[in-house]
Image (cartoon, grey):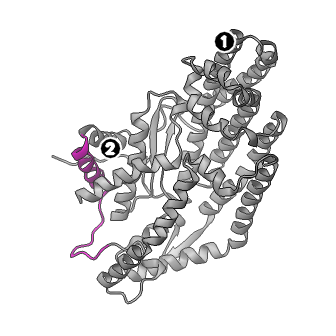
Amino acid sequence: MQQRIYPQQWQNQHIYPALDCPQVAADLALARASVDELGLFLEELGAVRANAQALQDFLREVRLRAQRIRNIGWNLAVLAACQGSQDARDELAKQLASRARALNADLFKTLAPVEDLMLALPEAEFEQLMADSLLGEEAYRLRHERRLQDQRLPVEAEQLVIGLGTDGLHAWGNLYNDLVGKIRLVIDGREMGLAEASNLLSSPLRALRREAFDAISAGWEGEQETVAAILNAINGWRLELSRQRGRSRQLDALDLSCHQSHIERATLDTLMQETWRARGLGQRALGLMAERLGIEELGPEDLFAPPPAAVSREIPFEEAIEIIAEAFSRFDPEMGEFARMMAEKGWIDAAPTPNRRTGAYCTKFAEPVEPRVFITYAGTMDNVITLAHELGHAWHNWLIRDLPMSQRSYPMTLAETASIFAETLVRSAL
């Protein structure tokens, strides 16, 4: 049977035909008007606060209105991110991303009084509201955030933080993405971007790996002051915000990070201690890797070198999908068919493009609930494993697609279990 040829660029036209289509403009206008209406509606919050039933009914209406706005803002942000990943210099993608960020920020600023109320309610009153089927969809998130109630600023200050973050904190990340799309390299006589160059770090040819590593390093060297400014600004923002929030109880950076990751500090400390204790295992593995590669001492360009093989060849995208699908199917046939479906529907963007962003990731649209995977595929075994990793995230998202949106968000500490599990299925099958 002839092997199926899959599209290697996202097929998002059923969500929005194009970034500049009338539907995008109409949805933005609708969401903007809805935010304004929600703000007017919330002026009645004080009037209903004293009556438990009135407050419950009021909060239900707020949640329904906010979710409709959130779905639009989420979809527009994902659409812009998808296009911006394919081409980091796409001006339409940048403009739409900026408008989506502003919309989402204004929604969260508008909702700040409700968030402040929910985090400060007496326990009995809070639990009574969480017994409501609609409001209770947020119960886990709110219970978690109530643990840091003493870190909240007054409502007006929280709104200021959200507003300034749009063109302050988040702008630094956007600048980094612009740099990724701008840097051009010449390797092996060909001009390419960082994403394509990164794939060469897993080439079986050491000379090509070294040339790619040196070119990538040189490309970033010209931007080192800008990158340093980005990192300093982001960390400066976090430190100052932590100082402002810590008036009654100062948290250090790792305590806050553990809270955001939904783990206890003792868990992180134990993991770090055990990693240090077992460091010899990694050192021996690298030594064995060098021996098998016939290299006296590994260089940084060798860390992703493939194992020696009698025949080294490029693995077509379609074959990679089949390798992954068969491995997934050994665990669960439905999981294997899901991998094929992702490829068939054009939910994986894999083809190299100019000005492409680096790395790989999984994202999702809010409505319809559909996952998307981004990778720059060049046919290496490292690409196959990375694709399996991201499809693990996508499978996780697919399994929980019928849950409320607030329950489809989870920390990295949970997210990576799905992706590493998917990787492991493929490694074991291979």
Nearer to the camera, 126 or 321: 126
Residue 345 vs residue 228: left or right? left
Q: Hey, which quadrant is residue 380 in on the image? A: bottom left
Question: In the image, residue 193 lies at what x, y percent?
Answer: 54, 65
> What's drawn in magenta, residue-wise?
307-332
Residue 308, horizontal then vertical, whole percent = 27, 77
Res. 339 mark: 2
Asked if residue 420 is positioned above or below residue 309 in the image, the reply reads above
Q: Nearer the viewer, residue 132 or 427?
A: 132
Is residue 8 at all visible to an observer of this figure? no
Place of residue 54 in the rendered image (x, y in percent of width and height, measured from the top left): 71, 10
Residue sticking out furthest to the left: 1
Query: Magenta segment: does it hold 93?
Result: no
Q: What is the quadrant of residue 69 in the picture?
A: top right
Q: Nearer the viewer, residue 325 or 205?
A: 325
Under mark 1, the amino acid is Asp
Rendered-image quadrant of the C terminus: bottom left
The 10 Å Cα crowd at callout 2, few under 14, some 14 to 19, many 20 or more, is many
Q: Position of residue 141 (x, y in %)?
A: 59, 34
Q: Is 409 placed left or right of 246 in the picture?
A: left
Kind of residue indicated by mark 2: Ala
Secondary structure of the residue carrying numbered label 2:
helix
Q: What's the CA distance linking mark 1 and mark 2? A: 42 Å
What residue is shown with label 1? 57
The residue at the point 46 percent across, 78 percent down is 301
Q: Looking at the image, is 281 positioned above or below residue 99?
A: below
